[in-house]
Amino acid sequence: MTALTGLSIAEARDGLKARRFSAHELAQAHLDGMAKARRLNAYITETPAIALRQAAESDARLKAGDARPLEGIPLGIKDLFCTKGTLTTAGSHILDGFKPTYESTVTANLWRDGAVMLGKTNLDEFAMGSSNMTSHHGPVLSPWRRRSGNADLVPGGSSGGSAAAVAARIAMGATGTDTGGSIRQPAAFSGIVGLKPTYGRCSRLGVVAFASSLDQPGPLARSVRDCAILLRSMAGHDPGDSTSVDTPVPDYEAAVGRGVKGLRIGVPKEYRVDGMPGEIEALWQQGVAWLEAQGATFAEISLPHTRYALPTYYIVAPAEASSNLARYDGVRYGLRVAGSSIDEMYELTRAAGFGPEVRRRVMIGTYVLSAGYYDAYYRKAQQVRALIARDSASAFETVDAILTPTAPSAAFAIGEKMDDPVAMYLNDVFTVPASLSGLPGISVPAGLSGDGLPLGLQVIGKAFDEETVIRTGAALEEAAAFNHKPDGLAA
Amino acid sequence: MSLDKTTVAKIARLARIRVPEADQEKLAGELSNILKFVEQLNEVDTRDVEPMTSVVATTLKMREDVVTVPGDRDAVLANAPLSEAGFFVVPKVVE
């Protein structure tokens, strides 16, 4: 790690403007770090030529005093975002060789604002997973290690490559997408900040679809302020995504440091789940104490349908996935396995192209949508989803934000929890409810487990009130003063 | 609901994913476990609850009924595994 790669986005922005270093030097420092950290497998595709070309343009603009908001800031892009002319895999074999002919709106917004692309980061296949173990391109290793041993750990998922890259200082920030926790859970496992915006805040155009009523792009970075800076560029209305909302994008960075004095924060009693490690419960209590000391008041709230969030999610998300993934047919892009009839070609292509977790989810989704089962499963789940959303809407009549742990454990080792898909799903028990309700949430690193691994706290806010989420997250961040670094950092 | 091999074969066919017979038993077990997990929802009283259709209450915007993305055949075909004379090529579907 060089001094340049250790900077925050805010610091780099100031340093570039003051011409203390160039965008080229900043990009090159990251590219060098990436080359040394390849064992992490955080990137599927490195794009040094693009990075250096964009950095050269940034340097020209900086020299001319014409800097854009993210001028020269090197980022990792989750390989679920279509990038024109650059391989986009979604972590799947079935998108082999796919080079989009168009750019996703979110990445186009980042380039418009001067950001620099380092490469495309690894992820669970089609963002289906909580460990990055389902990627066709192999697992990502977390740069963190337990104090008690050298086992390779997962970075979380599905935005695992993005989280590992940011934690390992081989990206200043990264894009992620969050369907049931895929930004917040890897942020918590990797000791960084991850922000899932309100559904509709960022455009989904050009983001490979998993579950369209849940998917939402958002930033991962090493501070709340950096996430706020990135979100301002990523967010905004897009006529190409009819669910993206046409409301002004606030200056999220201005919310950092506003403090929590006078905020009312809820602690949901239903989040005290059986078997939650004592250290996570203790950290949660510590979070309450930190915010109280800064002038927030707390109330216990009830979200009675919390325990039904995961079963609801595991109907809704696979159902939408089975529909979205119908497009992978061996005709229009990616892998094709020859067959004697068109149906045989479809079946062989999809059997070879999808990994086991994707096949399971597509089949569950197909089943719950099939004739005779739709009402019993899918309609039922959408009804319970309405009740879950109603729970949080009534809670937000009395509180401004909700504080919970992000995940029920610290990162686990590669290969653990792989035998039972349902056990893997439990990773998302604290993040899925906000996803189902479309609410914004942030995960902030708040402490270390007894074994030296990062633990995160989550703040959930009202729809389109990312500013309160950022304010509260920044207050937690300041109190926690989390300055631990992974010791597996590239030398 | 516990799924049997026949049902798994039927779902696989609907999903257009080839599942060899040797794998059907194992998959039936995995899918049954997931279904058992999601069937907890049967405990919830959902009488008179409208199913959610949109997570953010919003009215879809109207726009002029005009072409916004120009048709670019070469771009559409650029990633096709097999194309010929400006068309996608698939196995014969009409005798």
Image (cartoon, rainbow, N blue to C red):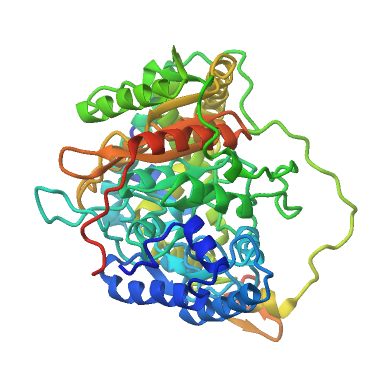
Residue at 37%, 43% (x, y): give it.
A185
Task: Tell me the quarter of the image containing the C terminus of chain A.
Answer: bottom left
> In the shown orientation, is residue A305 left or right of residue A129?
right
> In the shown orientation, is residue A410 left or right of residue A78?
left
The spot of residue A197 in percent (x, y) is 56, 42
- Asked if A36 appears above or below B47 in the picture, the reply is below
The spot of residue A261 in percent (x, y) is 51, 23
One can see residue A249 in this view: yes
The spot of residue B93 in percent (x, y) is 62, 70
The spot of residue B15 in percent (x, y) is 49, 52
Q: Which residue is outermost to the left? A: A148
Closer to us: A316 or B4: A316
Closer to us: B60 or A165: A165
Residue at 37%, 37% (x, y): give it.
A428
Closer to us: A214 or A235: A235
> In the shown orientation, is residue A400 left or right of residue B33?
right
> In the shown orientation, is residue B88 left or right of residue A197?
right
Residue at 80%, 70% (x, y): give it.
B70
User: Across the whole image, how many numbered discs are drawn on residues?
Assistant: 0
One can see residue A378 in this view: no
Closer to us: A478 or A327: A478
- Asked if B42 appears above or below A129 in the picture, the reply is above
Task: Tell me the quarter of the image containing the N terminus of chain A.
Answer: bottom left
Q: Which residue is outermost to the bottom? A: B85
Q: Quadrant of residue A255?
A: top right
- Asked if A290 appears above or below A407 in the picture, the reply is above
